[in-house]
Amino acid sequence: MICMLLRLKRAKSWFQTNKINVMEWPAQSPDLNPIENLWGDIKNAVSEAKPRNVNELWNVVKESWSGITAERCHKLVDSMPHRCQAVLKNCGHTTKY
C-alpha cells in the first residue's frame, strides 16, 4: 500500500512539474465509465435471479454477460459526448448518468 501511495505521489508531482492539468475522476464513476452501466445490468440480473449457490450465481452472470448486445454497447459509447458535456456543465460532479 505504501509503495502504491508513493507512486501516486510521484505521478502527481510529475504532472505538476510538467504543467499538465489532471481532471479529478472518481473511481467507478458511471458518468464517465460506461462499463459501470454494464456491471449494473449484471448486478440487477443477479438481484432478480436470487441465486442460491455459487454455481447458480456463475450461471446468472454468464447468461447476463452473454445477453449484452452490441447495440447496448454502441448506445453507451455514443452517449459519451453528452456524458462529458454533462459532467463539465456540473463542474465535475455526478450527473443523471
Image (tube, rainbow, N blue to C red):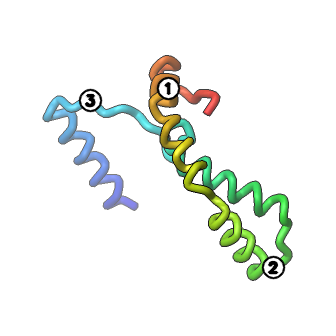
Q: Which mark is residue 21?
A: 3
- Which mark is first along the chain, 3 or 2? 3
Task: Locate the N terminus and report the quarter of the image it occupies.
Answer: bottom left
Dot 2: element: loop
Dot 1: element: helix
Q: Relative to residue 61, is residue 89 depicted above or below?
A: above
Q: Which mark is residue 87?
A: 1
- Judged from this view, the residue extending furthest toward the front is 71
- Crowding near pointer 3: few (<14 within 10 Å), some, many (20+)? few
Tell me the kind of residue under disc 3: Asn
Q: Nearer the viewer, residue 87 or 22?
A: 87
Q: Relative to residue 94, is residue 10 depicted above or below?
A: below
Q: Measuring 84% from the left and 65% from the top, which residue is drawn there?
A: 49
- Crowding near pointer 2: few (<14 within 10 Å), some, many (20+)? few
Q: Relative to residue 3, is residue 15 depicted above or below?
A: above
**Where does the image place residue 16, in percent across and percent down from the top left?**
20, 33
| Whether label 1 touches label 2, CB < 8 Å | no
Task: Locate the C terminus and report the quarter of the image it occupies.
Answer: top right
**Where does the image place residue 39, in percent across and percent down from the top left?**
62, 55
Tell me the kind of residue under disc 1: Val
